Image (cartoon, rainbow, N blue to C red):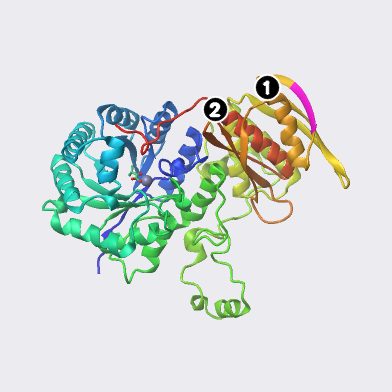
Amino acid sequence: MSKERLVIFDTTLRDGEQSPGASMTKSEKVRIAKTLEKMRVDVIEAGFAIASQGDFEAVKAVSEVVKDSTICSLARASKGDIERAAEALKPANSSRIHTFIATSPIHMKYKLKMDPDSVLERAVDAVKMARQHTDNVEFSLEDASRSEFDFMCRVIENVINAGAGTINIPDTVGYGEPLEFGRTIGRLIENIPNADKAIFSVHCHNDLGLAVANSLSAVINGARQVECTINGLGERAGNASLEEVVMAVRTRKDLFPVETHLDTTQIMPASRLVASVTGFPVQPNKAIVGANAFAHESGIHQDGVLKFRETYEIMKAEDVGLNTNKLVLGKHSGRAAVKARFEELGITFEGQDELNAAFIRFKELADKKHEIFDEDLQALVNEVQESVADRFALETLEVTSKTGTAPVAKLSLKIDGKAVEASAEGDGPVDAAFKAIESVVNSDTSLQLYSVNAITTGTDSQGEVTVRLEKGGRIVNGNGADTDIVIASAKAYINGLNAILADHAKAHPQQEGI
Ligand code: KIV
Ligand code: ZN
Protein backbone atom coordinates (compact mmCIF):
# COMPACT_ATOMS: atom_id res chain seq x y z
CA MET A 1 0.00 0.00 0.00
CA SER A 2 1.50 3.38 -0.94
CA LYS A 3 1.70 5.82 1.93
CA GLU A 4 1.06 9.54 2.01
CA ARG A 5 3.83 11.87 3.12
CA LEU A 6 3.71 13.22 6.66
CA VAL A 7 5.38 16.62 6.67
CA ILE A 8 7.63 17.11 9.69
CA PHE A 9 7.71 20.74 10.80
CA ASP A 10 10.30 21.32 13.49
CA THR A 11 9.83 24.30 15.79
CA THR A 12 12.69 23.69 18.23
CA LEU A 13 14.23 27.02 17.23
CA ARG A 14 10.98 28.95 17.77
CA ASP A 15 8.53 27.32 20.19
CA GLY A 16 11.38 25.30 21.74
CA GLU A 17 13.23 28.51 22.40
CA GLN A 18 10.18 29.79 24.30
CA SER A 19 11.00 27.40 27.19
CA PRO A 20 12.12 29.64 30.03
CA GLY A 21 15.91 29.83 29.90
CA ALA A 22 16.26 27.99 26.57
CA SER A 23 17.26 30.98 24.47
CA MET A 24 19.84 30.18 21.83
CA THR A 25 22.45 32.27 20.10
CA LYS A 26 22.54 32.71 16.33
CA SER A 27 25.42 30.27 15.89
CA GLU A 28 23.69 27.69 18.09
CA LYS A 29 20.53 28.01 16.02
CA VAL A 30 22.51 27.55 12.82
CA ARG A 31 24.15 24.40 14.21
CA ILE A 32 20.83 22.91 15.23
CA ALA A 33 19.27 23.86 11.88
CA LYS A 34 22.08 22.10 10.02
CA THR A 35 21.49 18.94 12.03
CA LEU A 36 17.76 19.16 11.26
CA GLU A 37 18.58 19.57 7.57
CA LYS A 38 20.82 16.50 7.74
CA MET A 39 17.89 14.68 9.34
CA ARG A 40 15.83 15.75 6.29
CA VAL A 41 13.24 17.66 8.31
CA ASP A 42 10.79 19.17 5.81
CA VAL A 43 10.20 22.57 7.44
CA ILE A 44 12.37 24.34 10.02
CA GLU A 45 10.70 27.17 11.92
CA ALA A 46 13.83 29.19 12.61
CA GLY A 47 12.29 31.91 14.78
CA PHE A 48 9.87 34.79 15.12
CA ALA A 49 11.60 37.46 13.05
CA ILE A 50 9.87 40.49 14.59
CA ALA A 51 10.53 39.37 18.19
CA SER A 52 14.02 40.90 18.39
CA GLN A 53 17.01 41.81 16.26
CA GLY A 54 18.60 38.54 17.41
CA ASP A 55 15.65 36.48 16.18
CA PHE A 56 15.67 38.31 12.85
CA GLU A 57 19.40 37.65 12.39
CA ALA A 58 18.98 34.00 13.32
CA VAL A 59 16.16 33.41 10.80
CA LYS A 60 18.28 35.14 8.16
CA ALA A 61 21.41 33.15 9.03
CA VAL A 62 19.52 29.84 8.92
CA SER A 63 18.00 30.88 5.56
CA GLU A 64 21.48 31.54 4.21
CA VAL A 65 22.98 28.26 5.32
CA VAL A 66 20.26 25.61 5.09
CA LYS A 67 19.32 24.75 1.53
CA ASP A 68 17.48 21.41 1.62
CA SER A 69 14.70 22.20 4.13
CA THR A 70 12.04 24.90 3.87
CA ILE A 71 12.76 27.73 6.32
CA CYS A 72 9.85 29.33 8.10
CA SER A 73 9.36 32.40 10.28
CA LEU A 74 6.42 33.02 12.58
CA ALA A 75 4.48 36.29 12.16
CA ARG A 76 1.37 37.59 13.90
CA ALA A 77 -1.46 38.61 11.56
CA SER A 78 -0.07 42.08 10.99
CA LYS A 79 1.77 43.91 8.22
CA GLY A 80 4.89 44.67 10.30
CA ASP A 81 5.34 41.07 11.39
CA ILE A 82 4.80 39.67 7.91
CA GLU A 83 7.20 42.11 6.25
CA ARG A 84 9.87 41.40 8.84
CA ALA A 85 9.46 37.64 8.35
CA ALA A 86 9.67 38.03 4.56
CA GLU A 87 12.82 40.12 4.86
CA ALA A 88 14.57 37.59 7.11
CA LEU A 89 13.61 34.72 4.81
CA LYS A 90 14.90 36.38 1.61
CA PRO A 91 18.10 34.29 1.34
CA ALA A 92 16.23 30.96 1.66
CA ASN A 93 15.95 28.51 -1.24
CA SER A 94 12.48 27.64 -0.05
CA SER A 95 10.62 29.76 2.50
CA ARG A 96 7.32 29.79 4.36
CA ILE A 97 5.56 32.52 6.30
CA HIS A 98 3.58 31.19 9.24
CA THR A 99 0.97 33.70 10.32
CA PHE A 100 -1.55 33.26 13.12
CA ILE A 101 -4.34 34.78 15.15
CA ALA A 102 -6.31 33.43 18.08
CA THR A 103 -9.82 32.15 17.39
CA SER A 104 -11.09 31.01 20.81
CA PRO A 105 -13.74 33.13 22.57
CA ILE A 106 -11.45 33.60 25.58
CA HIS A 107 -8.48 34.83 23.54
CA MET A 108 -10.58 37.03 21.24
CA LYS A 109 -12.39 38.69 24.15
CA TYR A 110 -9.61 39.13 26.71
CA LYS A 111 -6.34 39.15 24.76
CA LEU A 112 -7.20 40.57 21.35
CA LYS A 113 -10.30 42.53 22.41
CA MET A 114 -11.69 41.82 18.94
CA ASP A 115 -15.01 40.40 17.76
CA PRO A 116 -15.02 37.24 15.61
CA ASP A 117 -15.77 39.07 12.34
CA SER A 118 -12.75 41.34 12.81
CA VAL A 119 -10.56 38.33 13.61
CA LEU A 120 -11.74 36.63 10.43
CA GLU A 121 -11.02 39.75 8.39
CA ARG A 122 -7.57 40.12 9.95
CA ALA A 123 -6.76 36.46 9.23
CA VAL A 124 -7.71 36.76 5.55
CA ASP A 125 -5.78 40.02 5.13
CA ALA A 126 -2.70 38.48 6.76
CA VAL A 127 -2.72 35.48 4.44
CA LYS A 128 -3.13 37.74 1.39
CA MET A 129 -0.26 39.94 2.58
CA ALA A 130 1.98 36.92 3.21
CA ARG A 131 1.14 35.56 -0.27
CA GLN A 132 2.63 38.71 -1.76
CA HIS A 133 6.02 37.49 -0.49
CA THR A 134 5.83 33.71 -0.94
CA ASP A 135 3.58 30.97 -2.36
CA ASN A 136 4.10 28.98 0.80
CA VAL A 137 1.85 30.36 3.57
CA GLU A 138 0.74 28.61 6.72
CA PHE A 139 -2.11 29.91 8.84
CA SER A 140 -2.65 28.91 12.50
CA LEU A 141 -5.81 29.32 14.55
CA GLU A 142 -4.23 29.93 17.93
CA ASP A 143 -6.01 28.15 20.81
CA ALA A 144 -7.96 26.06 18.28
CA SER A 145 -8.75 23.32 20.80
CA ARG A 146 -10.89 25.85 22.74
CA SER A 147 -12.37 27.51 19.64
CA GLU A 148 -15.93 27.05 18.38
CA PHE A 149 -16.16 24.50 15.59
CA ASP A 150 -18.36 26.54 13.24
CA PHE A 151 -16.16 29.63 13.59
CA MET A 152 -13.04 27.57 12.83
CA CYS A 153 -14.75 26.24 9.68
CA ARG A 154 -15.52 29.81 8.54
CA VAL A 155 -11.99 31.04 9.18
CA ILE A 156 -10.35 28.05 7.53
CA GLU A 157 -12.51 28.15 4.40
CA ASN A 158 -11.73 31.85 3.96
CA VAL A 159 -7.99 31.65 4.58
CA ILE A 160 -7.68 28.76 2.13
CA ASN A 161 -9.46 30.91 -0.45
CA ALA A 162 -7.02 33.71 0.39
CA GLY A 163 -4.07 31.43 -0.41
CA ALA A 164 -3.01 29.52 2.72
CA GLY A 165 -1.58 26.13 1.69
CA THR A 166 -1.20 24.77 5.23
CA ILE A 167 -3.80 25.10 7.97
CA ASN A 168 -2.44 24.50 11.44
CA ILE A 169 -4.70 23.54 14.34
CA PRO A 170 -2.75 24.23 17.53
CA ASP A 171 -3.62 22.85 20.92
CA THR A 172 -1.97 25.94 22.35
CA VAL A 173 -2.74 25.25 26.00
CA GLY A 174 -2.43 21.45 25.91
CA TYR A 175 -6.15 20.98 26.62
CA GLY A 176 -6.88 18.40 23.93
CA GLU A 177 -7.60 14.72 24.50
CA PRO A 178 -6.64 12.24 21.77
CA LEU A 179 -10.08 10.90 20.76
CA GLU A 180 -11.75 14.30 20.80
CA PHE A 181 -8.84 16.16 19.15
CA GLY A 182 -8.48 13.56 16.38
CA ARG A 183 -12.22 13.63 15.77
CA THR A 184 -12.15 17.45 15.47
CA ILE A 185 -9.44 17.27 12.80
CA GLY A 186 -11.45 14.67 10.88
CA ARG A 187 -14.65 16.75 11.12
CA LEU A 188 -12.89 19.94 9.96
CA ILE A 189 -11.53 18.16 6.89
CA GLU A 190 -14.94 16.64 6.17
CA ASN A 191 -16.97 19.82 6.65
CA ILE A 192 -14.85 22.51 4.99
CA PRO A 193 -15.71 22.56 1.28
CA ASN A 194 -12.21 23.53 0.07
CA ALA A 195 -10.29 21.41 2.63
CA ASP A 196 -8.67 19.42 -0.18
CA LYS A 197 -6.78 22.58 -1.26
CA ALA A 198 -4.66 22.63 1.92
CA ILE A 199 -2.59 20.38 4.14
CA PHE A 200 -3.96 20.12 7.67
CA SER A 201 -1.36 20.38 10.39
CA VAL A 202 -1.36 20.03 14.18
CA HIS A 203 0.75 21.68 16.86
CA CYS A 204 0.19 20.16 20.30
CA HIS A 205 1.45 21.26 23.68
CA ASN A 206 2.11 18.80 26.45
CA ASP A 207 0.41 20.29 29.52
CA LEU A 208 -1.49 17.05 30.16
CA GLY A 209 1.28 14.82 28.79
CA LEU A 210 -0.84 14.15 25.67
CA ALA A 211 0.96 16.13 22.95
CA VAL A 212 2.28 13.11 21.04
CA ALA A 213 -0.94 11.11 21.48
CA ASN A 214 -3.00 14.06 20.24
CA SER A 215 -0.71 14.56 17.23
CA LEU A 216 -0.87 10.88 16.27
CA SER A 217 -4.62 10.78 16.66
CA ALA A 218 -4.82 13.79 14.34
CA VAL A 219 -2.67 11.95 11.78
CA ILE A 220 -5.04 8.98 11.86
CA ASN A 221 -7.85 11.46 11.18
CA GLY A 222 -6.23 13.17 8.21
CA ALA A 223 -3.56 15.61 9.44
CA ARG A 224 -0.56 15.49 7.12
CA GLN A 225 1.83 17.82 8.95
CA VAL A 226 2.95 17.55 12.56
CA GLU A 227 4.69 20.41 14.33
CA CYS A 228 7.13 19.15 16.91
CA THR A 229 10.44 19.78 18.66
CA ILE A 230 13.58 17.84 19.51
CA ASN A 231 13.34 16.40 23.05
CA GLY A 232 9.80 17.85 23.27
CA LEU A 233 11.25 21.24 24.18
CA GLY A 234 8.78 24.12 24.13
CA GLU A 235 6.60 26.62 25.94
CA ARG A 236 5.63 25.41 29.48
CA ALA A 237 5.45 21.58 29.44
CA GLY A 238 6.76 21.55 25.87
CA ASN A 239 5.58 20.49 22.43
CA ALA A 240 5.07 17.07 20.87
CA SER A 241 8.48 15.45 20.65
CA LEU A 242 9.75 14.96 17.10
CA GLU A 243 11.54 11.72 17.90
CA GLU A 244 8.45 10.14 19.46
CA VAL A 245 6.13 11.12 16.61
CA VAL A 246 8.56 9.99 13.92
CA MET A 247 9.46 6.68 15.56
CA ALA A 248 5.81 5.89 16.36
CA VAL A 249 4.86 6.34 12.69
CA ARG A 250 7.83 4.26 11.60
CA THR A 251 7.42 1.50 14.17
CA ARG A 252 3.63 1.15 13.75
CA LYS A 253 3.54 1.12 9.95
CA ASP A 254 0.58 -1.21 10.31
CA LEU A 255 -1.50 1.59 11.89
CA PHE A 256 -0.43 4.86 10.30
CA PRO A 257 -1.27 5.56 6.65
CA VAL A 258 1.74 7.91 6.33
CA GLU A 259 5.52 7.92 6.18
CA THR A 260 8.15 10.55 6.85
CA HIS A 261 11.28 11.09 4.79
CA LEU A 262 13.51 11.56 7.79
CA ASP A 263 16.94 10.07 8.37
CA THR A 264 16.19 8.80 11.87
CA THR A 265 19.86 8.06 12.60
CA GLN A 266 20.24 11.81 13.15
CA ILE A 267 17.80 11.76 16.07
CA MET A 268 20.35 11.02 18.79
CA PRO A 269 22.93 13.60 17.62
CA ALA A 270 20.16 16.22 17.38
CA SER A 271 18.85 15.35 20.83
CA ARG A 272 22.32 15.65 22.37
CA LEU A 273 23.01 18.89 20.58
CA VAL A 274 19.75 20.50 21.73
CA ALA A 275 20.28 19.29 25.31
CA SER A 276 23.80 20.66 25.36
CA VAL A 277 22.94 24.03 23.79
CA THR A 278 19.90 24.67 25.98
CA GLY A 279 21.23 23.07 29.16
CA PHE A 280 18.01 21.03 29.44
CA PRO A 281 19.22 17.48 30.07
CA VAL A 282 17.09 14.61 28.77
CA GLN A 283 15.48 12.53 31.53
CA PRO A 284 16.98 8.99 31.53
CA ASN A 285 13.61 7.30 30.95
CA LYS A 286 12.54 9.63 28.11
CA ALA A 287 11.19 7.62 25.16
CA ILE A 288 13.59 7.18 22.21
CA VAL A 289 16.44 9.46 23.39
CA GLY A 290 16.70 8.82 27.16
CA ALA A 291 19.86 7.10 28.40
CA ASN A 292 17.76 4.09 29.47
CA ALA A 293 15.54 3.91 26.38
CA PHE A 294 17.46 0.93 24.99
CA ALA A 295 19.00 -0.38 28.24
CA HIS A 296 17.72 -3.67 29.62
CA GLU A 297 18.25 -4.07 33.34
CA SER A 298 16.25 -7.13 34.26
CA GLY A 299 17.93 -10.51 33.78
CA ILE A 300 14.86 -11.94 32.06
CA HIS A 301 14.87 -9.08 29.53
CA GLN A 302 18.61 -9.34 28.91
CA ASP A 303 18.33 -13.07 28.36
CA GLY A 304 15.42 -12.58 25.94
CA VAL A 305 17.19 -9.86 23.94
CA LEU A 306 20.34 -11.97 23.63
CA LYS A 307 18.30 -14.91 22.32
CA PHE A 308 16.18 -12.86 19.91
CA ARG A 309 16.30 -9.07 19.94
CA GLU A 310 12.63 -8.54 19.12
CA THR A 311 11.52 -10.31 22.33
CA TYR A 312 11.86 -7.00 24.17
CA GLU A 313 12.87 -4.42 21.56
CA ILE A 314 10.46 -2.81 19.12
CA MET A 315 13.06 -0.49 17.56
CA LYS A 316 16.74 -0.81 16.81
CA ALA A 317 19.07 1.50 18.72
CA GLU A 318 21.05 2.01 15.50
CA ASP A 319 17.93 3.37 13.78
CA VAL A 320 17.85 6.38 16.09
CA GLY A 321 21.59 6.92 15.83
CA LEU A 322 22.65 5.35 19.12
CA ASN A 323 25.95 3.46 18.92
CA THR A 324 27.25 6.17 16.62
CA ASN A 325 28.93 7.64 19.68
CA LYS A 326 32.32 6.55 18.42
CA LEU A 327 35.64 7.61 19.83
CA VAL A 328 36.78 10.23 17.42
CA LEU A 329 39.88 12.03 18.48
CA GLY A 330 42.67 12.13 21.02
CA LYS A 331 45.77 13.97 22.10
CA HIS A 332 47.68 13.18 18.92
CA SER A 333 44.96 14.22 16.52
CA GLY A 334 46.04 17.00 14.21
CA ARG A 335 44.30 20.20 13.28
CA ALA A 336 42.97 18.85 9.98
CA ALA A 337 41.36 15.83 11.68
CA VAL A 338 39.78 18.01 14.35
CA LYS A 339 38.45 20.46 11.76
CA ALA A 340 37.09 17.60 9.63
CA ARG A 341 35.24 16.09 12.61
CA PHE A 342 33.75 19.48 13.49
CA GLU A 343 32.52 19.75 9.91
CA GLU A 344 30.97 16.27 10.04
CA LEU A 345 29.06 17.45 13.11
CA GLY A 346 27.78 20.44 11.15
CA ILE A 347 29.95 22.86 13.11
CA THR A 348 31.57 25.69 11.22
CA PHE A 349 33.58 28.59 12.57
CA GLU A 350 33.33 32.24 11.82
CA GLY A 351 36.89 33.03 10.87
CA GLN A 352 40.30 31.63 11.67
CA ASP A 353 40.36 33.04 15.23
CA GLU A 354 37.38 30.99 16.29
CA LEU A 355 38.85 27.82 14.76
CA ASN A 356 42.19 28.50 16.50
CA ALA A 357 40.42 29.00 19.84
CA ALA A 358 38.55 25.72 19.34
CA PHE A 359 41.75 23.87 18.52
CA ILE A 360 43.56 25.27 21.58
CA ARG A 361 40.63 24.27 23.77
CA PHE A 362 40.61 20.82 22.15
CA LYS A 363 44.30 20.31 22.98
CA GLU A 364 43.76 21.42 26.59
CA LEU A 365 40.93 18.95 26.92
CA ALA A 366 42.87 16.13 25.24
CA ASP A 367 45.64 16.62 27.80
CA LYS A 368 43.18 15.91 30.61
CA LYS A 369 41.00 13.34 28.94
CA HIS A 370 42.43 11.07 26.31
CA GLU A 371 39.20 9.96 24.68
CA ILE A 372 37.35 12.84 23.03
CA PHE A 373 33.78 12.09 21.96
CA ASP A 374 31.37 14.03 19.76
CA GLU A 375 29.58 15.33 22.86
CA ASP A 376 32.89 16.77 24.14
CA LEU A 377 33.33 18.62 20.86
CA GLN A 378 29.79 19.99 21.00
CA ALA A 379 30.34 21.31 24.53
CA LEU A 380 33.68 22.78 23.57
CA VAL A 381 32.13 24.66 20.66
CA ASN A 382 29.40 26.08 22.90
CA GLU A 383 32.14 27.71 24.95
CA VAL A 384 34.27 28.95 22.09
CA GLN A 385 31.44 30.41 20.03
CA GLU A 386 29.80 32.09 22.96
CA SER A 387 32.94 33.70 24.30
CA VAL A 388 33.49 36.01 21.34
CA ALA A 389 31.86 39.20 22.67
CA ASP A 390 31.85 38.34 26.36
CA ARG A 391 32.35 40.93 29.10
CA PHE A 392 33.48 38.40 31.72
CA ALA A 393 35.99 35.57 31.29
CA LEU A 394 37.47 33.14 33.79
CA GLU A 395 41.26 33.15 33.80
CA THR A 396 42.24 30.94 36.77
CA LEU A 397 40.47 29.26 39.65
CA GLU A 398 41.91 27.61 42.74
CA VAL A 399 39.72 26.00 45.40
CA THR A 400 40.82 24.53 48.71
CA SER A 401 38.44 22.10 50.26
CA LYS A 402 39.21 20.06 53.37
CA THR A 403 37.05 18.12 55.85
CA GLY A 404 36.11 20.29 58.80
CA THR A 405 36.94 23.66 57.18
CA ALA A 406 35.00 25.97 54.92
CA PRO A 407 36.16 25.79 51.28
CA VAL A 408 37.83 28.88 49.85
CA ALA A 409 37.85 29.87 46.18
CA LYS A 410 40.45 32.24 44.72
CA LEU A 411 40.04 33.29 41.15
CA SER A 412 41.09 35.77 38.57
CA LEU A 413 38.65 37.10 36.01
CA LYS A 414 38.86 39.40 33.04
CA ILE A 415 36.16 42.05 33.22
CA ASP A 416 35.94 44.12 30.05
CA GLY A 417 39.51 43.06 29.31
CA LYS A 418 40.90 44.06 32.76
CA ALA A 419 42.30 41.43 35.16
CA VAL A 420 40.52 41.29 38.53
CA GLU A 421 41.26 39.01 41.52
CA ALA A 422 38.66 37.74 43.98
CA SER A 423 38.28 35.24 46.78
CA ALA A 424 35.48 34.00 49.02
CA GLU A 425 34.52 31.28 51.45
CA GLY A 426 31.42 29.17 50.82
CA ASP A 427 29.34 26.25 52.03
CA GLY A 428 30.93 24.10 49.36
CA PRO A 429 33.53 24.61 46.61
CA VAL A 430 30.93 25.64 44.01
CA ASP A 431 29.25 28.04 46.44
CA ALA A 432 32.66 29.56 47.25
CA ALA A 433 33.45 30.02 43.53
CA PHE A 434 30.07 31.69 42.83
CA LYS A 435 30.47 33.98 45.85
CA ALA A 436 33.97 34.99 44.72
CA ILE A 437 32.63 35.86 41.26
CA GLU A 438 29.75 37.83 42.74
CA SER A 439 32.11 39.76 45.05
CA VAL A 440 33.49 41.53 41.98
CA VAL A 441 30.57 41.40 39.51
CA ASN A 442 27.66 42.29 41.87
CA SER A 443 25.17 41.14 39.26
CA ASP A 444 22.02 41.32 41.37
CA THR A 445 20.78 38.09 39.77
CA SER A 446 19.16 35.18 41.56
CA LEU A 447 20.26 31.61 40.94
CA GLN A 448 17.19 29.53 40.10
CA LEU A 449 18.76 26.28 39.00
CA TYR A 450 22.09 24.52 39.25
CA SER A 451 22.56 21.15 37.57
CA VAL A 452 25.51 18.94 36.70
CA ASN A 453 25.44 16.29 34.04
CA ALA A 454 28.19 13.90 32.91
CA ILE A 455 28.66 14.42 29.16
CA THR A 456 29.98 10.92 28.49
CA THR A 457 30.60 7.83 30.62
CA GLY A 458 33.59 7.25 32.92
CA THR A 459 35.10 9.25 35.75
CA ASP A 460 37.18 11.28 33.30
CA SER A 461 33.96 12.55 31.70
CA GLN A 462 33.48 16.27 31.43
CA GLY A 463 30.82 17.60 33.75
CA GLU A 464 28.41 19.87 31.93
CA VAL A 465 26.92 22.41 34.30
CA THR A 466 23.80 24.48 33.71
CA VAL A 467 22.86 27.45 35.85
CA ARG A 468 19.66 29.42 35.45
CA LEU A 469 19.83 33.08 36.45
CA GLU A 470 17.01 35.56 36.87
CA LYS A 471 17.16 39.33 36.91
CA GLY A 472 14.16 41.65 36.69
CA GLY A 473 11.93 38.88 35.33
CA ARG A 474 14.38 37.90 32.60
CA ILE A 475 15.70 34.32 32.76
CA VAL A 476 18.78 32.91 31.05
CA ASN A 477 20.72 29.67 31.16
CA GLY A 478 24.50 29.53 31.40
CA ASN A 479 26.49 26.43 30.45
CA GLY A 480 30.03 25.33 31.08
CA ALA A 481 31.93 22.07 30.66
CA ASP A 482 35.18 20.81 32.12
CA THR A 483 36.63 17.62 33.57
CA ASP A 484 36.74 19.57 36.86
CA ILE A 485 33.16 20.28 37.88
CA VAL A 486 34.03 23.30 40.03
CA ILE A 487 35.68 24.91 37.00
CA ALA A 488 32.70 23.84 34.84
CA SER A 489 30.41 25.49 37.41
CA ALA A 490 32.36 28.76 37.42
CA LYS A 491 32.35 28.79 33.60
CA ALA A 492 28.60 28.17 33.55
CA TYR A 493 27.97 30.96 36.05
CA ILE A 494 30.10 33.39 34.05
CA ASN A 495 28.41 32.30 30.81
CA GLY A 496 25.03 33.03 32.42
CA LEU A 497 26.21 36.45 33.62
CA ASN A 498 27.42 37.31 30.13
CA ALA A 499 24.01 36.42 28.73
CA ILE A 500 21.87 38.14 31.34
CA LEU A 501 23.86 41.35 31.35
CA ALA A 502 23.68 41.58 27.53
CA ASP A 503 20.67 43.35 26.09
CA HIS A 504 18.36 41.20 23.99
CA ALA A 505 14.81 41.55 25.20
CA LYS A 506 12.36 39.95 22.81
CA ALA A 507 8.65 39.91 22.17
CA HIS A 508 6.63 36.80 22.91
CA PRO A 509 4.23 35.63 20.19
CA GLN A 510 1.44 34.44 22.47
CA GLN A 511 1.55 37.16 25.09
CA GLU A 512 1.42 40.18 22.86
CA GLY A 513 -1.79 41.29 21.21
CA ILE A 514 -1.63 42.60 17.68
O1 KIV B 1 1.02 27.08 20.54
C1 KIV B 1 0.66 27.82 19.61
O2 KIV B 1 -0.52 28.11 19.40
C2 KIV B 1 1.70 28.38 18.76
C3 KIV B 1 1.22 29.06 17.52
C4 KIV B 1 1.88 30.35 17.31
C5 KIV B 1 1.31 28.12 16.37
O3 KIV B 1 2.86 28.23 19.02
ZN1 ZN C 1 3.10 26.53 20.46
Q: Which span of residues is magenta-colored?
A: 420-424
Asked if the beta carbon under badge 1 is closer than 8 A to the nearest atom of ligand 2, the reply is: no
Q: Is residue 274 above or below residue 381?
A: below
SS class, disc 1: strand
Residue 449 lies, in percent from the top left, at 61, 43
Point out residue 69 in the picture as x, y percentages from the top left corner.
35, 44
- Whether residue 400 is visible to the viewer of this picture, yes or no, is no
Amino acid at the residue labelled 2: Gly
Question: Which corner quadrant of the image does residue 182 belong to?
Answer: bottom left
Mark 1 or 2, closer to the camera = 1
Rendered view: 44 above or below 442 = below
Going 24% across and 59% down the picture, which residue do you hit? Answer: 184
Q: CA distance from mark 1 to mark 2?
A: 24 Å
Q: How many marks?
A: 2
| Mark identifier at residue 57 | none
Q: Residue at x 33, y 39 (%)?
A: 72
Residue 422 against residue 510 in the figure, above or below: above
Q: Amino acid at mark 1?
A: Ile
Q: Residues within 10 Å of mark 2 (few under 14, many from 20)?
A: few
| Callout 2: SS | helix
The label shown at residue 351 is: 2
Left or right of 432 in this view: 114: left
**Percent x, y of residue 168:** 27, 48
| Prevailing secondary structure class for the magenta stretch in the rendered image | strand
Q: Relative to 442, is 145 on the left or the right?
A: left
* Residue situated in front as seen by the camera: 285 or 440: 440
Residue 480 in view: yes
- Which residue is the site of mark 1? 415
- The N terminus lies in which quarter of the figure? bottom left
Quadrant of the image occupied by residue 209:
bottom left
Describe residue 398's horizontal placement relative to residue 389 as left or right: right
Q: Neighbour class for label 1 at 10 Å: few (<14), some, many (≥20)?
A: some
